[in-house]
Amino acid sequence: MLPVRLIPINNIPDNPVICNMQRTGYPDGREPALPHCPICGGVCETVYTVSGFGVIGCDICVQSVDADECADCFQ
Ligand SMILES: [Zn+2]
């Protein structure tokens, strides 16, 4: 009969998934990619597009202006 080696419970490493969850909060250890605006590069939640032109900006770099106060609308 082989001798039994006892391993102290403190020396047993955690499962890699548990280590990743503790370190990053995600099972694979990689944080999900956040959407970035292709115009300003900011992390954004909404992008604005124009048909035929694609993305023109996002909730960070595009501003809404009242047409009555915009000189470009009266040219
Ligand atoms: Zn932007």
Image (tube, rainbow, N blue to C red):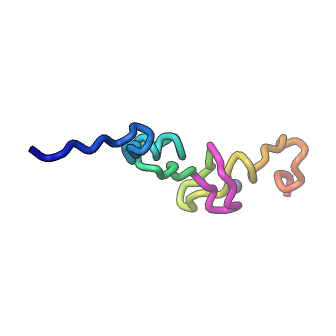
48 vs 29, left or right, is right
Q: Position of residue 34 (x, y in %)?
A: 57, 50
Pick the front one: 36 or 1: 1
Verify whether residue 43 appears in magenta. yes
Q: Residue furthest left?
A: 1
Q: Residue furthest top?
A: 9
What's the residue at 44%, 39% (across, down)?
10
54 vs 20, left or right, is right
Is most of the magenta stretch helix, strand or loop? loop
Magenta-tinted stretch: 35-45
Pick the front one: 44 or 54: 44
What's the residue at 88%, 42% (across, down)?
68
Above or below 1: residue 54 = below
4 vs 48, left or right, is left
Verify whether residue 49 appears in magenta. no
Pick the front one: 71 or 64: 64
What's the residue at 38%, 43% (across, down)?
12
Q: Which image quarter has ligand 1? A: bottom right
Q: Position of residue 64 (x, y in %)?
A: 78, 43
3 vs 72, left or right, is left
Q: Position of residue 16 (x, y in %)?
A: 39, 47
